[in-house]
Structure formats: C-alpha cells, structure tokens
Image: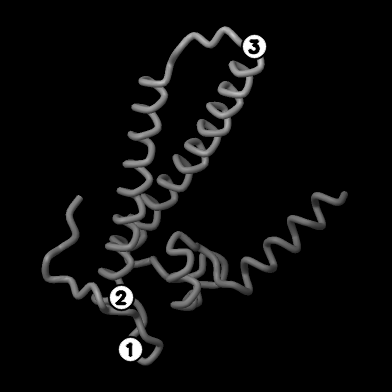
Amino acid sequence: MKAENNFDKDYRPAEDEPFMNERQLEYFRQKLLTWKASILEESRNTIEDMQAGTRNIPDVTDRASEETDRALELRTRDRQRKVVAKIDSALRRIEDGSYGYCEDTGEPISLKRLDARPIATLSLEAQERHERKERVHRDD
C-alpha cells in the first residue's frame, strides 16, 4: 500500500477549513492506511519469529517462560487484529461520507480527537457518556 504521491505529507487538518473536506479525508485515509500497514507488518514479523523460534527447551521453567511470552504476543496480535477491523470500518466511513461524525449525535468529532484516534466513532462528550453508563452497569 503506497501513499499517493500527490499528497502533501506536511499537511495537518485545521479548524478554520471546511470540516471533512477532500484534503482532510485524504489525510485521515493515509494515516489509517499507514497504521494498518504497520500493524500487518508487525504481525508478519511475529509469525516469522514464532516459526523460526520454535524449539525444544528441556528446562521446564524456561519453556514456561517462553510459552508465556508467546501467549502475550498472541494476545497483542489479537488486539491489533481488532484494531485493523476498526481501521477498515473507518476507511469505509471515509468512502460513504460518514467519517468524522459522531455515531450518537451526528455532530462533528474534533480534529484533535480524530488525529489522536483516527478510528474514533464518538465525540469526546458522547464517549464520556458511554463510559459513565458502562461503569454504572458494571457496578450493578
């Protein structure tokens, strides 16, 4: 996945331009594609390392330690697999025109929030409400 050559890599979305204009959409598309490529590359490296690192370790403690490390690595990769699904969903939202808008309120999500978490689907306020509601239900 190569970034488009005509995209200005120094561009940063600004509050004083129209929300989710073509430049902003392309900025977030490239950011998401780069993030996804990075995760997929890490996953490929993990698989290669695990395949190359398979060995018979006679010491039970060392074997347990290596298995724990592998389990942790696999858990990390599983989390990243879920992030890739969210990235794909964000890319679909860019294509259908709904990217950058809160799923709850329909209001624009702040550019700062999207820049920090480009897979965000809720505005900061809606996310806080969601987390408070979740905390209340968890305490029940």
Residue named by callout 2: 24
Q: Quadrant of residue 13?
A: bottom left
Residue drawn where x is 52% and y is 33% of the image: 73
**Do the CB atoms of the residues marked 2 and 1 lie less than 8 Å apart?**
yes
Within 10 Å of disc 2 (Cα), the crowding (few <14, some 14-19, many 20+) is: some
Find the distance from the CA under tag 2 to the CA under tag 1: 9 Å
Where is residue 5? Give x, y as percent: 12, 66
Coordinates of residue 107 in the picture (x, y in percent) = 50, 77
Which residue is painted at 67% across and 62% down in the image?
A: 130
The residue tagged 3 is: 60
Image spot of residue 119 (x, y percent): 45, 59
**SS assignment at label 2:** helix
115 relative to 122 in the view: left or right: left
In the image, is residue 13 above or below residue 62?
A: below
Q: Which residue is disc 1 drawn over? A: 17
Residue 31 located left or right of residue 114: left
Label 1 crowd (10 A; few <14 / some 14-19 / many >=20): few
Q: Secondary structure at mark 3?
A: helix
On the picture, is 124 further left or further right than 16? right
